[in-house]
Amino acid sequence: MNQMEREILILEENFRDTIENDIAKNQSENKKTEIKDIKLVGQATWKDKISGKDISDNVFIVEKEIIETDENGKERVTEQKSYYLGNRCVAGTLGNDEIVYSKSFAESEIDKQKAINDLIDKISEKEIEKNSMNKLKNEELKEILTEYLGRKITEEELPSLLEKMNNQEIEEVQGKIEKRENKEEENNKLSKRQTDKIKVNQVQRIDLEQKADGVKELGKKLDLDGYRYIYVVYSENVKEIKQDENINNTTYSLVGIKDDGTASVMNNEFEMDKTVGNNAGRLQTKIKADGTATRDNKDSSVFVRKSNGMTIGCENDMGTVRVSLGQKTLQENENTEIELRTSNTGYIPIETRRVFKGDKGIYQIDKIQDKVEEHTQNGCKPKDVRDFDGDENTETHEHIDMDYYVQDILNYENEEGEEKIKGVFTEKGVKDKLLRELEKSKDKLTVEQIIENVKTEMNSDAENFEREHKK
């Protein structure tokens, strides 16, 4: 088991303990309910109705067995699948596995219902099954017995072997495994001096706060809470800096820098993908920073995030190491990638990044190709291209829906929920201001940062204007 699987198991077991207490309160002599399995689906996210901020909670599938006894002592056994948002049961299923929400939840919590549906739409049955509490528990027990007996244990022989061990023996072996894993995790950490050497020797630095798809921060997409940067370094340099480190048998390695400045080699977080890269048969579709599209197998190293399957690919492009974020399609099982902004590569247009936006699940190759056709080897030539200012001689070309962002700025609400900008400025005034800022800061800031700065500045100007005219 990897660390993420162990954390999911602990989460599910704690959740089971919580809802078992509620179930126990409703048990009767003639009706008994038993939890058969729990599966973490993921986190559903919706907007708070007052603050507008994102709120998230875990969604679980709970499989139950209900035994009812009638007055003649005859038992009726039924299986039930329930959906929980946090600790609250909000839905069940019909015979065809169609989700049916409780009446009160369906009528009063429409936003949460949509958040759950969106989550379920983008998570495959295979991924949910991987989170089965029963399967994870069996994996844990197989590790314990493998340690105890000194040989690999199969799923089939697990029940009979467990009968021969008492609880104390199981706990003792489990303690040894956890102690060894904690030591391995500690070994992956780097001292301050080693961290400084990594920073000096780094090939690329990846900012995990960048929005790789134009919507979601890279750190969240990679499930790397607590990390601020990823450094790409030559694997041989890791070995030179940390002698006891088991480095990857590949050109590059990843080192994570946390918010507190500590660093560790990311062997526990990522594993190597041997199906792609040099001399591998599987191809990758990639949108590069300059807007061109490629389909090849030039990535020297591809790292797969153990918890969710997202990938980081590294390609040496005539001396510049380009880093890409990817994921595999469901049907073709091919990697699809978007180049990331790093310390040595510039800003990537927002619409280019949104080609790989994953809100509705994993894109299929044919859908991606429709977008890729707009990003040819001859440069960025989308069908709906237009300049910011209408002058082809200026460098204001960008994939940005200007009308949308003008309205977004006009409708900006300050901390008091007031829309000050639209009360003072016209659409033309906002557009002119945005064009000036884009031209001035396009090489320094992302489009999102420029737009946020325009909102803040124009809101302040509008408030000052109102104050002046009230005097």
Image: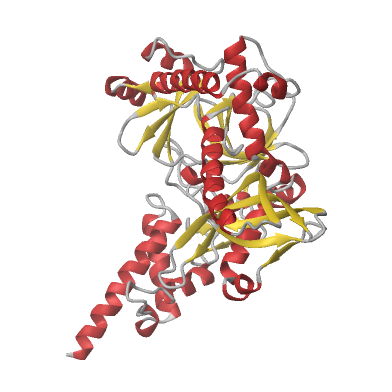
**In the image shown, does 394 or 122 lie closer to the viewer?**
122
Pinpoint residue 77: horizontal percent, then vertical percent: 79, 52
Pinpoint residue 227: horizontal percent, then vertical percent: 40, 38
- Going by the picture, which residue comes out furthest to the front? 72
The quadrant the N terminus occupies is top right
- Going by the picture, which residue comes out furthest to the left? 471
Looking at the image, what colour scheme do you see? secondary structure
**In the image shown, does 223 or 295 lie closer to the viewer?**
223
Q: Relative to 82, is 328 above or below?
A: above
Horizontally, is 251 left or right of 73 in the view? left
Residue at the spot x=44%, y=20% of the render? 179
**In the image shown, does 443 or 143 lie closer to the viewer?**
143
Residue at the spot x=52%, y=18% of the render? 173
Residue 133 in view in this figure: yes
Pinpoint residue 112: horizontal percent, then vertical percent: 57, 65
Pinpoint residue 190: horizontal percent, then vertical percent: 35, 22
Residue 299 in view in this figure: no
The quadrant the C terminus occupies is bottom left
Residue 95 sits in quarter: bottom right
Residue at the spot x=38%, y=63% of the render? 452
Horizontally, is 83 left or right of 412 in the view? right
Residue at the spot x=44%, y=38% of the render? 342
Q: How many marks?
A: 0
**In the image shown, does 186 or 406 lie closer to the viewer?**
186
Q: Relative to 308, is 168 above or below?
A: above
